[in-house]
Image (tube, rainbow, N blue to C red):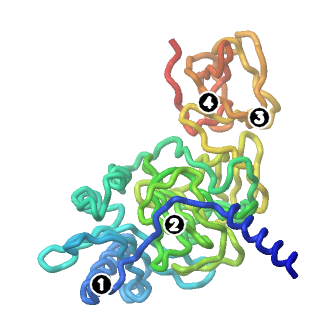
Amino acid sequence: MRKKWMYWCIGFALLLVLMPTVAVPVWENVTTSQFSEDDLSNLTEAVTKEMTQQKTQQKASISAADVESRAQVNVQRKDPDKKWVFGTAVIEAPKEKGAYPEGWIYVAKMEEAEWKVALEGSQLFQSWLQDAPSTVVNSNEKKAFANRSSDVKIMADQDQLRLPFALGATWTLTGGPHGYSGQNTPYSSLDLAGGNQQVLAAGSGNAYTMCGNGQGWIRIIHANGFATDYYHLLNNIRPNGSWVDVGTFLGYTGTDVSCGGYASGRHVHFALRYNNAYVSINGREIGGWVFWSGNSAYGGYAMHGSTVRYPGQGLYHYGALAPNQGIVDVVGRGTLNVRSGPGSNYPIVGTKNDGEIVTIACTATGTTFTGRSKTTNIWDRIGNGQWVSDAYVWTGSTTAVAPTCN
C-alpha cells in the first residue's frame, strides 16, 4: 500500500511539473456587487441594441428578439466613476451543428445618464478606445487596436502567423476551409486536432476571453492588422487583454460550447480575422501551408510547395514565414535549379528541393518564367552567387518581397 501511495505521489508531482505554466493574469468579470443591477441592466440593453443594429446593417436573418434572448454582455473592466466600461459581447449560437456564436470587443461610455456603445470594427470604437482612461484600456491595447477599420480594404500579403500548435508537430486537418459559422462565407476557419492537443497562440498580441464564463473562446488581436479566434477550448487560460507571446499555451482542444454551437469531437476551431472581420483563408499561408478553399465548406486542401494535404491528413508545422522568405514550389517537377546570376543564361551552381524555405536577400530582373501562381521576371538572391526564379518561390506576392540588389 505504501508503494502504491508513493507511486501515486510521484506521478501527481510529475503531472504538475509537465503541465504548461503561463504567466497571464486571470480574467475577471465584474460582478453585480461591483456594478449595480440597474447599471448592468442598462448596459446590457445598450450593448444588445448595438449588436442588433450591427446585424441589421449586415442584413442578417436574425430578429431583435433573438439577439436579445441570446446576448451575452460581459463587463471586464470599468473606471472607478463607472463612466467607462470595456468588455466582450456575444450573440450566443443555438447548440446545434453548423451554428457558431458571433462576438465583439466593445467599449461603452456614459453620456447624459445613458450608456453609449461602440463595437469592435467601428470608427467610434477606434475613437473611444483612444479616449478611454488607462484603467479601462491600457496603452498597449490602444496601440494594438489602432489603425483597424472596416474601411481598410487592402490586406497584407503575409500574415506571418503560425499554426496553433507546436513547431515541428503534425496535427490532422479535421476540417478544411469553412465559415466561422460553418457554411457561411468567407471561408475563414480551419478545424485542427492531434498531437498533445495543446493549442498555442499563432502570433503575439493582446488576448481576450469572449464567453461570459471565461471558457472556450479566445481572441488574439495581433499588431499587423490580423486577429485569430480559437473556439472549443478546454481548460483555457483566462486573459483580460494581457499580452501573449507567439506559442503561448491557450488551452487544450475540446468540445466546449460556452457561447453555443456544436462540436462532435475535440478540436480547435481556428479562424482568421483582418481589420475586425473574418476574412477568407483562401490563398493565405499559415505555418508554412497555403490553404485553398473547395467548392463547399470543410473541403479544400493545403499546399507546401507541391505537397498537397486534404482534410483527414496531417499538417507538419514549419512555422511562420518571415516577410522576406518563400517556399520553393517547382510545380511537381522535382528540384529547382540555382543559378550564379539572375537568369537562365547563368551557370547552374546547385539545386533546391520542392518545399524548402528560402530567405531572399535582394532581387533583380532576368529571364521570365511561369510558375504555379505567377509569371515574373523577378529573380531572388538566396545566397552569395545563388539565384532562383521568383516564379518558383511562393511568397504570397506577385511583386518583390526584398529590396533590389545593388
The span from disc 2 to disc 1 (Cα, nearest Å) is 23 Å
Q: Amino acid at mark 1?
A: Leu
Tags 2 and 1 in contact by the CB under 8 Å rule?
A: no
Q: Amino acid at mark 4?
A: Thr
Q: Amino acid at mark 3?
A: Asp
- The residue pinned by badge 4 equals 375
The span from disc 3 to disc 2 (Cα, nearest Å) is 36 Å
Placement of the N terminus among the 4 image quadrants: bottom right
User: Of callouts 1 and 3, which one flags the residue occurring earlier in the amino acid sequence?
Assistant: 1
- Across and down, in percent, residue 104 comes to 40, 69
Residue drawn at (53%, 63%) of the image? 229
314 relative position to 27: left or right: right
The span from disc 1 to disc 3 (Cα, nearest Å) is 58 Å
- Across and down, in percent, residue 265 comes to 71, 75
**Vertical side of 134 occupied by 161: above or below:** above
**Vertical side of 141 occupied by 347: above or below:** above
Label 2 neighbour load within 10 Å: few <14, some 14-19, many 20+? many
Label 1 neighbour load within 10 Å: few <14, some 14-19, many 20+? some
- The residue pinned by badge 1 equals 40
Res. 218 mark: 2
Q: Nearer the viewer, mark 2 or mark 4?
A: 2
- Residue 123 visible within the image: no
Residue drawn at (61%, 43%) of the image? 320
- The residue pinned by badge 3 equals 354
Q: Nearer the viewer, mark 1 or mark 3?
A: 1
305 relative position to 49: left or right: right
